Amino acid sequence: MSATGPTLDAQNPWPGLDAFDEAGRPFFHGRDEEIEDLLRKVCEAPLTVVFGKSGLGKTSLLRAGLFPRLREESHFPVYVRLALRPDAPSLAQQIQDRLRETLGKEKIDAPAMREGESLWAYLHRADLEFWNARNFPVTPVFVLDQFEEVFTLGSGLGDAISRLRNDLGDLAENRIPETLKDVLTGSDAAAGALQLRKMPYKLLLSLREDFLPELESWRSAIPSLGKTRFRLIPMRPDQALAAVAAAREIVDEPVARRIVNFVAAAAEQGGETASVIAPGTLAPDGVTSIAREIEPALLSLFCRGLNEARKKAGKARIDDGLLEGAKQSIIGDYYLGCFEGMPASVSRFVESELITEKGFRNSYARDDAVPAHMSEAQLQRLVNMRLLRIGESYGAQRIELTHDLLTRVVREHRDRRREDEAKLAAAQRAAAEREALQRQAQEREQEIEAQRRQEREQHLQAEARAGRRFKFLAIGLALVLAFAAYAAVVAQTQRSSAERARLEADSQRAEADSQRKLAQERLDRITEGLRMKQAVLSGDRARIQAFLRDEAETRAGQQGGSIRFTARADDLGYRNPAGQQIYKFSLMPDPSMLAQAKKNVAVITYRMDHPTFQNALLATGADRDFTASYTGWGCLRRVVVLIEYIEPDQPPELAYYDMCEALNW
């Protein structure tokens, strides 16, 4: 799959989560040491393995850093990203196809490939030479990028992956393929047409560091995999500063320093980096302690976001005002903003089809996605916002996320959506149960009414029979008293039976009323809980205050409800431009109540009840000890807390507490 990167210029020097391509070389800064080190390894070794964590810019380093230098050293890159699908050509054929395309595109003079000729046989021809457009001999470097997809998307292509391992081993170790041995043994002419010891090419594999164990399993077939390796690590602060400050037309160096520090703090808050560098090392505006390592993808995404805000505001340069207005959750807010105004089905498609269940990137055919899952306009918007990109693979366009760094937020959003859907389904089931109870109550009431009618009819029939008996008793005076006594006994027995039936019917009716009342009370609790959650999520202060008054009356005025809360402030060691000390503030249940909370509570949502917060909601669960954090310079006198319980019948609680009082500030 190949994709065209964004067009960069002096006013748009950062590609965001897209990789730099070779045309973006003038704007690719901060990796000069790595470029030269990698160039030396590639030129000296037949096979080089490049590895590093996701988000460090391996593809950018290759395309914008290594490729131009290879050309200067009489090499030409053949960029390959394998299409790992059952309907795609063989993986060795794909590499050969990329070579053929590169020769034509760059006007490199070389012998034509024969029908049915393998890549190994072609590269070992006795007459094979490559001459570039300036009439200099050049050597191809086959660059297999994002090679970890062989172990993720290719996990179900066992035979194809085995053939690829053997073909790469033959190329890397310069050994004769099994399919050629018999031909060469039986034909002197065929053997003479090849230079078997010749190796006029280089190989480079690039993959994520967490897939090195899978690559190690290939060492028995390809020993060279362990000889020459290059590990890409995160940027140092001075490298990050070079990457930002190089955009001199739109940012001054002091602001660039503060940008680097801001991104470093964001990475540390997100759990990516916890270490700090020693005092005296590069730090902005007198701050002597920032994160030791910075991810280029996060830096580029943040810088691109700042630059878009600059252009929208009509400013000539990025200033402190734009920087201070940046959102704390950079990637998460960027992801959610991409879907603003779109139907939920579009984000559902991205979360269901463009990552695997385990969180790896996946691709999807464009023709199958449009218009079944999104409109063409929606697709183009997501492409323009650099969330998605469209690549070409054997005549078919496929959609994928622009970077592995997005998979984490996509997976988290998918999991939260599934959790919300499960809660909604539970509420719908509760409503269905209530309706069923109401129907049962109505049916029981109808049965009771029918029984009453039957009792009345029986009573009337009894009275009619008694009247007839008295009429017959008038015939003879001698029999009147005997028949009268008998009739009285019979009548009394029937009245007692009717009374017992009536009392039983009244009891059943009371039971039905009780069941209907219980069902209504359960529905009211669920409805009230949903209204409470909606008020917190939407920030409706009037409704939140009303709920808090009700909670206070119910719980005799206790501020924290059934769970007490506390706070912690960790000094981050630097100040903002206004001179205020910056802290990492953490909100959490009182430690003495954490065990009880983990047993009963599902989610705690903190609402930062202050107009300066753009990201006012912080939701957390038991896996993080119900702790939420933000970075800033001040505490809040009022933090609203929504407590949702694991047991569906237990309604949520709404509370608040004074964070500054908890900190003794």
Image: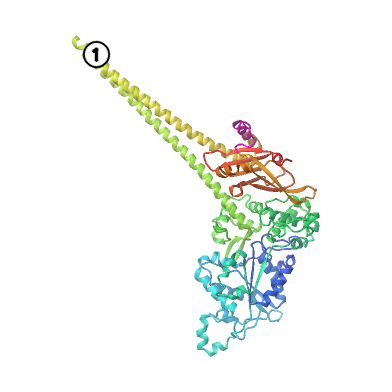
From the viewer's perspective, is residue 393 above or below residue 656? below
x, y (%) of residue 456? 33, 23
x, y (%) of residue 14? 72, 61
Report which quarter residue 381 is drawn in.
Answer: bottom right
Residue farthest front in this picture: 592
Q: Residues within 10 Å of mark 1 (few under 14, many from 20)?
A: some
Q: Residue at x 71, y 39 (%)?
A: 661
From the viewer's perspective, is residue 161 above or below residue 477? below
Note whether residue 324 is visible.
yes
x, y (%) of residue 125? 59, 84
Q: Which residue is mark 1?
A: 484
Note whether residue 463 is visible.
no
Report which quarter residue 612 is drawn in.
Answer: top right
Report which quarter residue 261 is drawn in.
Answer: bottom right
Give yes or no for residue 561 being in the magenta stretch.
yes
Q: Residue at x 53, y 45 (%)?
A: 423
Kindly state the secondary structure of the residue where label 1 is placed: helix
Q: Quadrant of the C terminus?
A: top right
Q: Would residue 516 be found to the left or right of residue 563 on screen?
A: left
From the viewer's perspective, is residue 599 above or below residue 10? above
x, y (%) of residue 240? 74, 61
Badge 1 amino acid: Ala
Q: How many numbered discs?
A: 1
From the viewer's perspective, is residue 489 above or below residue 611? above
Residue farthest top in this picture: 477
Write down the region rendered in magenta: 547-562
Q: Quadrant of the N terminus?
A: bottom right
* Colour setting: rainbow
Give yes or no for residue 442 being in the magenta stretch.
no
